[in-house]
Image (tube, grey):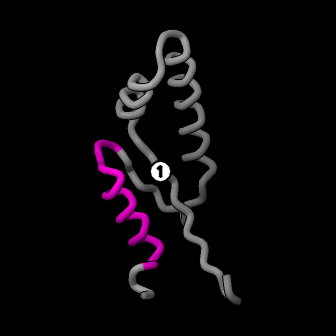
Amino acid sequence: MGDRPRVTAVLLTASDAVTRRRLAGREIGSALRRHIERGIIVARELEEAAPDWVHRVDTGDRTVAGIAAEVIGLTGWMAER
């Protein structure tokens, strides 16, 4: 890592509606309800606990490539090459 590693923290976020839709695509029945309830709790905890210097990246209705490009931009990796 070298003498001076640089850390870039990123919190991936999505609206409750997007999260419900994603979970509904892979969970069924009572498991879906539990995952939605737990997801809401964890999302709120992460938002409150993550310091202001942590970047928030909204993943709602975006492609993986688009999200990755934003994260890479935040890290400055491409500018260093």
Above or below, comparing residue 27 to residue 51 in the picture: above
Residue found farthest to the right: 3
The percent coordinates of residue 72 (x first, y second) are: 42, 69
The local crowd at label 1, few if under 14, some if 14 to 19, many if 20 or more residues have their Cα within 10 Å, is some
Residue at horizontal 41 percent and vertical 42 percent from the top: 14
Residue at horizontal 39 percent and vertical 60 percent from the top: 68
Residue at horizontal 29 percent and vertical 43 percent from the top: 61
Looking at the rendered structure, the secondary structure element under dot 1 is strand
The percent coordinates of residue 28 (x first, y second) are: 47, 15
Give yes or no for residue 72 being in the magenta stretch: yes
Q: Which residues are magenta?
A: 60-77
The percent coordinates of residue 10 (x first, y second) are: 52, 59
Which quadrant of the figure contains the N terminus? bottom right
Which quadrant of the figure contains the C terminus? bottom left
Residue found farthest to the top: 29
Indicate left or right for 66 with 76 as reference. left
Q: Nearer the viewer, residue 69 or 20?
A: 69
Residue at horizontal 59 percent and vertical 36 percent from the top: 42
Q: Amino acid at mark 1?
A: Leu
Q: Quadrant of residue 74?
A: bottom left
Indicate left or right for 1 with 12 as reference. right
The percent coordinates of residue 60 (x first, y second) are: 34, 43
**Total numbered labels placed on residues in the image:** 1
Above or below, comparing residue 6 to residue 26 in the picture: below
Indicate left or right for 57 with 62 as reference. right
| Residue designated by label 1 | 12
Above or below, comparing residue 81 to residue 21 in the picture: below
